[in-house]
Image (cartoon, rainbow, N blue to C red):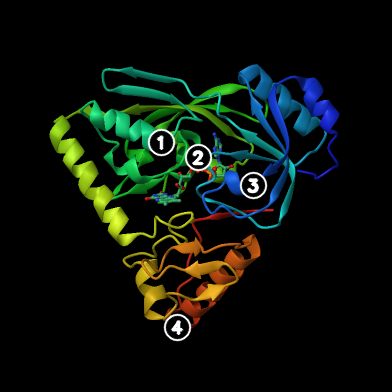
Amino acid sequence: MGSKIMNIKDIYDLNVGDVIENVDLSKYTTYKINGTGRVLVIPSDIDGLKRLIDYIKTNGLKYKILGNGSNLVFIDSVYDGILIKLDNFNSLDINDTIVTAGAGFNLMKLALKCSMMGLSGMEFATGIPGSVGGSVYMNAGAYNSDISSILESALILTPELEIVKYSNSDFKFGYRTSVLQSNHDYICLAAQFKLSHGDKDEIMELVNNRRERRFSSQPLEYPSAGSVFRNPTDDYAGRLIEELGFKGKSIGGAQVSEKHANFIINTGGATGHDIYDLISEIRKSVKEKYDIDLKVEQEFVE
Ligand SMILES: Cc1cc2nc3c(=O)[nH]c(=O)nc-3n(C[C@H](O)[C@H](O)[C@H](O)COP(=O)(O)OP(=O)(O)OC[C@H]3O[C@@H](n4cnc5c(N)ncnc54)[C@H](O)[C@@H]3O)c2cc1C
């Protein structure tokens, strides 16, 4: 992918949906890091999205699909590519235990809605502030469950601008991984989940207990992007980081949370570089002390 200079007028002329220039990036990621996105496009529909991707590819432009930005760090203060948000891909259909949602649908809201309807299987997702599309990409999960345990299929827009149906096995899901992570030009348009009928009160009790657990163990009062590192096999990244004395350690506005060592919080004015440097320092120490290569769960966007 190139990073040629884009012509903003062309993007307006494509007439694909809303075009917003010089967006305040702090509004588009949960880390709330200050920065500017040169242009954000919110396609109205699939034809608009196809036209936009076609234009981007023809002109070799840089772009990024943004979900809820709950796993992203923009490294520089200006992102000069095209940001694309699938807010208008927010359809929802619930047919007995089959739930079909657009990629832009909020996962937390979806999980809560299903749980309140007595549908079981998405309880794990009631605390994950991603979009459906971003969560399929990440195989988001918690409490020994994840997207792969409920996903039936998803619609994918390929780089050839074809819409294909991927079954669960096509995603090659692993711990916080999916095939989309090695195919950045594939866009998830919608996902279908298979849940099961359960007892509404029991489901909601579980959801509420977990919510309390999250609030008591995670620094949800600060901007963050959730867990920074994937847990190494048979251990917890947070345990290793805490043991090395990193809790409370800051670089600029980025700080290792006092409450949970696998969270980095933005205490105010953090830059992408502050977060990157803090992560690098932690990885170096963990490698030196335990000979473990911690894998970063969060994604840096250049
Ligand atoms: C407080 C907090 C708690 C969290 N807890 C958890 C947790 O328990 N478990 C967990 O797994 N995660 C957790 N996360 C991380 C995050 O919410 C998940 O990784 C989530 O799935 C990311 O979704 P998103 O829409 O925000 O994706 P984004 O961060 O916007 O994007 C992530 C990646 O997905 C790509 N992407 C987004 N949409 C699409 C699409 N439609 N098609 C193709 N690619 C796409 C983006 O280009 C990017 O590469 C937490 C985050 C926070 C802030």
Q: CA distance from mark 4 to mark 1?
A: 38 Å
* Image position, residue 236 (x, y; %): 35, 66
**Residue highlighted by disc 2:** 134
The earlier-in-sequence mark between 1 and 2 is 1
Left or right side of 222 for 209: left
**Residue highlighted by disc 4:** 289
* Image position, residue 263 (x, y; %): 44, 63
Circles 3, 1 touching at the beta carbon (< 8 Å): no
The answer to whether 46 is drawn above or below residue 288 in the figure is above
Q: Nearer the viewer, mark 4 or mark 1?
A: 1
- Mark sitting on residue 128: none
Disc count in the image?
A: 4
Q: Amino acid at mark 2?
A: Gly
Residue found at the very far bottom of the displayed protein: 289
Q: Secondary structure at mark 3?
A: helix
Q: CA distance from mark 2 to mark 3?
A: 17 Å
**Residue highlighted by disc 3:** 25
